[in-house]
Structures are given as structure tokens and as C-alpha cells.
Image (spheres, coloured by chain):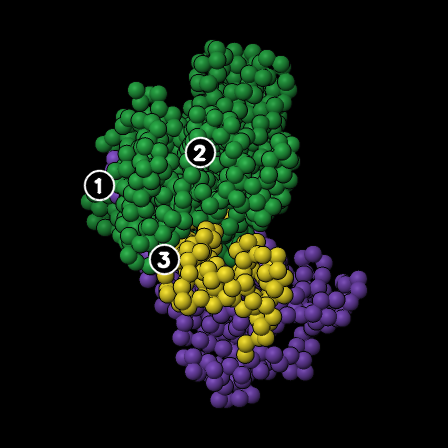
Chain colours: A purple, B green, C yellow
Amino acid sequence: MERSWLEYKTDAWVQWCPGCGNFGILNALHRALAELDIPPEKLAIVTGIGCSGRTCYYVKGNSMHSVHGRAIPAATGIKIANPDLVVIAEGGDGDMLGIGVEHFVSVGRRNIDITVIVHDNAVYGLTKGQAGPTLPSWWRTKALPGPNLHDNLNPLLLALASGYTFIARGYAYHVSQTKELIKKAIEHKGTSLVHILQPCPTYNNIMTKEWYEERIYYLEEENPDWDPVVTSQDEFTKKIGDIMGKMVEWGARIPLGVFYVNIAKDTFEQRLEKVIADYRKYPPAKRPVHVNGKPLIDPWTIFADKVIKT
Amino acid sequence: MTENVDLKLLIGGPQGGGIESAGQIVLKSLVLKGYQVIGTREYQSNIIGAHSYFTIRARAERPGAIHFPVDAATLLDAESIFTHFQDVKPGGFIIYDKSAVNTKLRLIAPMPKPLKQRLEEFFKSRGLEPVAGSALKVAEENGVKLIGLPMKDLVRSVAKEAGAPLSRAGKTVNTMGLTAMLYFSGVEPSWIEKAINVHFAAKKKVADMNVLASKLAVEYIDDTYGGPCCFLPEGPNLGKEVMLVTGNEIVAIGKAVGGLTMQTYYPITPASDEALFLEGHRNLDLAPWAEEALHLKRIGSVVLQTEDELSAIIAALGAAAAGARVATSTSGPGFALMNEAISLAIMAELPVVITVWMRGGPSTGLPTREGQQDLLHAMFSGHGDNPKIVLASGDHVEAYYDAAKALNWAEKYQTPVIHLLDKYLASTVTNIHREEIDPLKITIERGKLVENPGPDYKRYQITEDGISPRAPMGKTTMVITGLEHTEDGMPTEDPVVREQMMAKRRRKFETIAKEIPASEKVVLHGDPDAKVTIVSWGSTKPIILEALKLLEADGVKANFLQIRLFQPFPVKEVLDYLTRAETVIDVEQNDLLQAAFLIRGYTGFEIKHFVKKLTGRALWDKEVAWAVKRILEKGDREVVVSGGA
Amino acid sequence: MKGRIIARAPATGKCETCKYWRPHVVYDYIGYCEKHRRITMNDDTCPYYEPLEIREGEFYWCSTCKTRVSWEEAAEYLKKGYLLHRGAYVEPDIKEELYSVF
């Protein structure tokens, strides 16, 4: 059964500024979900705070609007409690790479099967355009009282170092290409990052639509043999130099596409399955808790290691 | 005859020197012999080398508190001698290592400098040389019998007789020390041997070596001192099955029985032992009644160590949103981070139990010591108007039921439940009887959890009792949010809806206040007509109950009002009891007298007398009794007690 | 490459000054002999005895001050009569005796 992307739209007013890159990202997400035929009740979409945080109200599913920087831990809790859900965590660069960067890093160590979408506009839109973690130093976007004194970080390298097993970058106004990246990320088993470059016409007067479009290109267009997939440690060692070379490319040219896919690592859910009885069938949100109000266990047998018979 | 038995023992030594095993073996020996016990650990924020000690008390009736002086102490090194030579009662005895007597105070590197200075002044004022032997001499002059063990020779004999390399040689030192103390006190060697075998059940070689060491200690006491000083009859609990558990462990057990499916945590003292214990028992064999009903043999729970406490609480909230029955566990500093999510849990109406194991603050303060300084922190955690449930447990058995009950309340009322506990309870071991923690006395409730919500489901449906049906994710669509919202979770700033939603959440809180029985809010212990009422909360409960007995023996009739539930605050109950008394005395282990502050704020009742302890050491029954008498005799406003090393 | 020898423990002939001996981390009258691979007492003696050498660039366990010290400090402490060793002996299952402390 073919689903229409309109099924994933809600009736909420989409309140972003005119020309906001979020519109493109939202549409790409709607279309990706439709093409993957994910039933809305099986979708969990968690956001942090920021313009991107509103996304959860605009996608039909199980939405959770958490607090600033915490979309990833909330998504982690949901996925562990019910691994049958498709879980997406969304946030801006401030949310994911500033206030929530410890979670952005730690989720990679678990390789839990969630998709992290970073809407990167390099500014804090909702609070009047302060510098975000991806704004280069000495740049002065229009709402800044002075130049930015902080260097920008590299989200792709950070994700790689943290253990993400799928890393891609898209551009907000390229809806069809971004949709494909999101689809691949959702289909990937493990922690996926889709880093999306997003002009903020209201506050970022430097990294504009024109600025991006002069620079961006797709990895596979430039090199039809580009193959980001790693299936073993040997292949990782062989390919990682080229992959990192592309990840650090930023300036006159900015590459987009899938940079890295590692299919050799187990997911957190697979790890839990190995240590927890019947985890797949009875994860925390689905396991029995009582029998007609009676507890399931007798502490005198479960905790027999603490029992002494006098 | 056993009713006269009230044995108080202490084992002191360096951290990593077998003090934990020694304490456990003493407790097990006395439990095996038929007594009820408590044992509490005092240790420093250090992994290996600093001084720590285990205080133990055994009686026919379960002891509720420890205190100094003790009847006997095993002091395994010079620092222990220096620290505890005045903590043994006249007529009692000290077991010590003979080779320690010449150790100079100056050369004990791990000893805290202020203590060293105080001791130096003490010895100087008495004209004594600052060596361990001088400390022992002072004890002897106070009527304490000294029993020196030639520890080195004894270890040599163990090595010789064991006929094997002694990779765990340190464990024979503590075993010989504790054996000498127990045997001299009248515990027959057979009980000690049995306790050693129980303790090292999984390590036969270690057990055998320690049994041998124990035998050599007994022989030495026989040869040198002509056998035990005393006779200890067998206790009345022989033949019973008991669980010997810490507060951390009993809370974990309560959660597991109470149906916890997932716990998150970030390592912190004194909380993490609870999560580790849960993780060690994450796969659970179903009881016969459950196996039969569900045709299932085992079930698992997830324990997730997160990157920080922010993640711990939010991951728990995510799991709760998905439909899991969840808890997280921390201490004051970690709870400070969790504050961020308290308001989210309230606004988004997500059920979570936050177990807060208090320790001495402010800041990192005294990481391994007692404190009841986070009551106001718990009460006022979170920004915005933020009603939540706050309860405090008084002892092991209460903590067991409260742990399960907190999970019920969280799910029934879809709100955070803060369960306050503390370091004293966390690291105090006691014996629990089967009937005390019967799993079938626990009823698991999940409130308005709906399995088939249907397409028109509204997460925040306005209801009369303020509680909306809660659907797990995966069955329908919904919006869960920390923004003010309409019934379907969509954000709104509409003034009419804002008021409706504020009122809905208020009604929920009124439902909570109405539904929780009065007996679970406050408990008045002792004679309701007593003229003196002691008011307190948390782990002081059994200590104050002991103090009531001491007071009664001294002709003072007092009762004890234990506050169990702080939010919703039981205004009427507290006021009723306090206005009945002539003198009200508040006992707390914090400087701001936080419960008294809340009592005044909620009820207008002003308490005028206070007992507080701030040292971070366990509160004693006898110091509470002493302070109460002092207040009654002299009318002091505040008495500060400070027992313990 | 081994550092230059800058000091030597007094050749008392007893385990506690021997280079093969590591005192128990807290009960320093017992220790582990690496030569015999067994527990011995601090004042035991044996034909393999060799006094501890303090070498540049190495760190030592000072059982008198219960801490690890550099070669310069070790050489200094030997003069004060402190006991220095190549390391301390920690029992394999010491975790059973330790607490969560922060």
C-alpha cells in the first residue's frame, strides 16, 4: 500500500519564518516516512528546543517535545523501552552540538538504532540569533553585537569519533536528495546522523541560500565510485582516510551525501538481547509487570544470595 | 536471658583491609546464633588506605541504632587504635595487633590532619608519648581490657599450615581479629566458622584458609587468656530464614518486586550500589503463581548507565512515554542535574520514580557520609509551579514497600515521585524476616494505562480527577510535551486553555492528596498522650524509636511523629498531632532544619526546640535521648549532637 | 632502558628492604615475594635477598607514607629511614572490600 506524504502532516500551523530551511527538511521527512511506509503509530519523533524542536508537532506519530539538548536521551529511552518503534531525534546545531553535545557523543557509543537529524543553521534563532556551535570564529552574523569568538566544530568528525555507524549530510532546499538521505538513515541499523545545512534567512546573513549553493556538491556526483560502506575493520582502515578527507572539506566546496556507513557493528538492542531474557519479545514497555496486581517474583528466590538460614 | 543481650561491636581498619568482609562475617555469625543485627559502615572518600569502621549491634529484638561506647572493638592497625581508643566502655575490651603499639602518630600518613593535631595535644597534655601504645594505655586506665594479637606470627602460622601461597593474606588478618572479638565475647567458634563458610560460599579455598585463621585465633585466646570472658546464650531467632541486606539492596528488591522494568542511573555515592544490585539481578525467574499464569519462566529488566544524570532522567522519561515502568536513582549532586527534567515530567505528565540517596552537602560536601540536606531540594526541585510527590522512608522494611508504592503512585498519577533516602540507610545492613517483605503484600497498580486507545486518543484529556488515560507509544499517535498544550498535546498559549490545564493538574494533585491514606502520610509512634512529641523524618525513625525507650527508662514519656509524605503535605494530620503536645522537638540531620521550615510554612506551627547532627556520622539513639532531656531540663532552643569518629 | 641507580635501600637482609618484595597495600608486615611467588613477612630472610635500588625515572611505593613517589623523593625518603618498594601488593579480590566513595 502506497502512503501519501500528506498522511504525516498534522493540522498545526507551521510557524517557521518565511524562507526557513526547516520547511524543506520537514517535507523531506514527510516524504521519507511515506516512501518507507512507516505507520504513524510506530513512529516516535523526539525533539529538543529550538526552531527544529517544533518538528514534532508537524509530523503525525508519537511525538515528544523534550527539553533543550535532550532529544537524544529521550529517544534512547523510548527505543530501549520499545525497540519496535522507529525513533527519530531532531534538533538544531545549538541543541545537538551545544547544550546536548554530551548526548550527541554518547549515543554513538551505544550504536542504538535511532536516527539523529541535525538542523544546522549556525545560529540560535529562537533567542535572537546568537552564534551556534557551527558558526566559524570571527564571523559576525547580523544579530551579533560583535564577531563570534568561538571556533566551529565539525559535526561529521565528531559523529565518526563517537561511533555513529551512518553519517550523511544534506541541504535543506534539496528536498528530494535529503529525503533519500533520511530514508537511508532510518533504514540503517544503528545510530545514524543526517546533518542538514539550513539557511536561516532571518538571522544568518552569511550562510545564505546563495552562499551554500555556490559551494555544495554531492560526493557520488563528483566521484561515481564513491563507496562509503565499511563491512570490516580492514575495510575501515583502508577507507577511513578518504572518508575523513571529505568530512573535513569545508570552504570553497562543501560535500553532501553519505560519507560513512559501518555495517560491522552490533546495535545496542542486539547487545541487550544477549544479556536480557527475552528482550526482543518483552522489552520494558511491553513486558508483563504483574498478574492481576500480584508481583511476578518472590524476593526470597531471586535474591537468594542474600538469604541466610539460621 | 537473651533479652539482656545487647552486644555492641566495632571493627576498624584501613579501607581495603577487609573491614567489609569482617563486618559481614560478624553480622552473619550473630544472625546464625539467633540474634537480630544492624551494622553500619563509616568510610572516607578514598578507595584504599584511609581509615574506615563497621559498627555492629546485636539483640533479641532488632536494634534500631548504634552508638559508642561499644563493648568490644577490633582495631586492626595503629590508625584504628588512635581513632577509637576512647570508644570502648569500661569493662569492655580491645583486640589489637601487637606490632602496632610502637607506631608513631606522626607517621600515620592517611590520618586527617585535624584529628592528628587533636590527638597530639591530647597526648601532650597527659605527658604521653604519641604512639599507639599510649592510646591503649589510656584505654586500659579507663577499665578496658587489652587483648593483643601477634598478628604477624599468626599470619605466618596460617601460611605454614595452609601449605599454599596466601594470595589473600589480608583476609586472614581481619578474620583473626573478628574471631578473637566474637570468641572472647562468647560466640562459639562453630558459629564463626559457619559464617565464614556462608560468606565465602563461592570460594572454597578462601573459606578454608579463613576457617584455619579463625581456629588459630581461638587457640591463641585459649592459650593466652584462658578462653572467652563471657557467655553469650543462643538468640531467640534460631531456625529462621533471614535476608541480610543494606538499604541500597532492599530498595532495589522493592523496585524489582514492585514491577520495575527499567532503571537509569549515572554513578554516584551512595546511590549506585542500588542500580548495580538491580543490574546483577536483571533476569528474574518468575514465582510459581506468575509462571503458571503467564507461561513464562524468566523476565528481564533493563538497567542503563547513562552519560550523566540529565540523560538518566530524560531517558527514563522517554521510556515512561513509551509505556515502561521506570525509575532512576541518584544523590544530591546528581539530583541537581535532574532538576532540569522535573518540570518536564510534571508538565508532560510522565511517570518516573526518582530515588534520591542523600549525603552530606552542600556541593560534593561529604560524599560518603550521612546527611538529610536535600528535603527542600526535593520539595522545590524544578521550575514553574511544580507539584510532585515526595516521600521519605524510615527504615529497611518501609523502604521496601515505599519503593514499590512509589512506582504505583508514579504510574497512577503520571507524575514524578521523589523517594528520599540517605547514606545511613544505604550502607546499614540488617536482617529481614520473610513475613516482613512478603511479595504478596504488594499490589501493583498501573492506573489509567490503556492498551487500546483508538484513533481519537487525547494524551491530556481533561477529566474530573485530573488524570488522563495513558497510552503506550506504538498503539496510536499522540503528542507529549513540556509546552502548555491542548488536550491533544498541541502547544497553545490560549489563556482559557492555560487555566483549564493548570486546573486539571491541580485537580490531579488534589486527587493524590485525597487518595493517599493518612497512615501513609504521617505515623505517630508511642503513647498519643505523651506530653513531649519528637518530630522527624527519614532514617532517624528507628533511632528515635530506640531513644523513646531510653527516655522512658529515665522517666520521660515522649512520642514520635514521623512524617512519611512531604508532598502533598499532610497539613491537617501534622497540625493535629503537634498541637496536642506540650513540647515539640524537631530532630534533623541538616542545618536549616528543613522539615521544621516546611511544617511552619504549611501549617503555621512554629517548632521551638531542635536537635541536629551535622557531622555526617550516624545519629545515635542515646544522643537523641540526651538532647531531648537537656531541652526538657534547660529549655535549650537547639542542641547539636556530634557522636562518632 | 634502565635509569641510573641513584640510591640503595639499606642492606638489612630482610624482605622489607628487598627488591623482590611488595608489601601488602595496607598491612605492610606481610607482603608478596616475586622471587618465591608467595606471601612472606617483612622480617623474613632468604638467600636471594637483594636490596632495592632506586633508579632514575622510576616510581616507588613508600609504605611508610602510603603513597607512590618519584625516584628523587624515594632517594630522599630512604635517608629518613622510610621503607620504599617497587610497588605494593594488592589482593586479587580487593574489590569486595571497597566502597563507592564519590
Judge whether B427 appears above or below A79 on screen: above
Quarter location, residue A101 = bottom right
**Residue at 30% across / 58% down in the picture?**
B164
- Pointers 1 and 3 in contact (CB under 8 A)? no
**Residue at 75% across / 71% down in the picture?**
A139
Q: Residues within 10 Å of mark 2 (few under 14, many from 20)?
A: some
Residue B502 visible in the snapshot: no
**Looking at the rendered structure, which numbered label has been put on residue B634?**
none
- Residue B320: percent from the left, percent from the top? 44, 48
Looking at the picture, which amino acid does disc 2 mark?
Leu
- Residue C75: percent from the left, percent from the top? 61, 64
- Pointers 2 and 3 in contact (CB under 8 A)? no
Q: Which residue is mark 3?
A: B167
- Residue B342: percent from the left, percent from the top? 55, 44
Residues at marks 1 and 3 on the same chain? yes
Q: Of the two numbered discs 1 and 3 on the same chain, state the one appearing first in sequence.
A: 3
Kindly report the distance in space between the C-alpha atoms of the residues bearing marks 2 and 3: 30 Å
- Quarter of the picture holding the C terminus of chain A: top left
Circle 3 sits in a helix, a strand or a loop, which is it? loop
Looking at the picture, which amino acid does disc 3 mark?
Ser
**Looking at the rendered structure, which numbered label has been put on residue B146?**
2
Name the side, left or right, on which A277 lies relative to B607. left
Judge whether B278 appears above or below A168 on screen: above
Circle 2 sits in a helix, a strand or a loop, which is it? strand
- Residue A83: percent from the left, percent from the top? 38, 59
- Foreground: B532 or B337? B532
**Residue at 30% across / 50% down in the picture?**
B209
Q: Give the chain letter at badge 2.
A: B
Name the side, left or right, on which C18 lies relative to B633. left
Quarter location, residue B545 = top left
Q: Give the chain letter at badge 1.
A: B
**Looking at the rendered structure, which numbered label has been put on residue B289?**
1
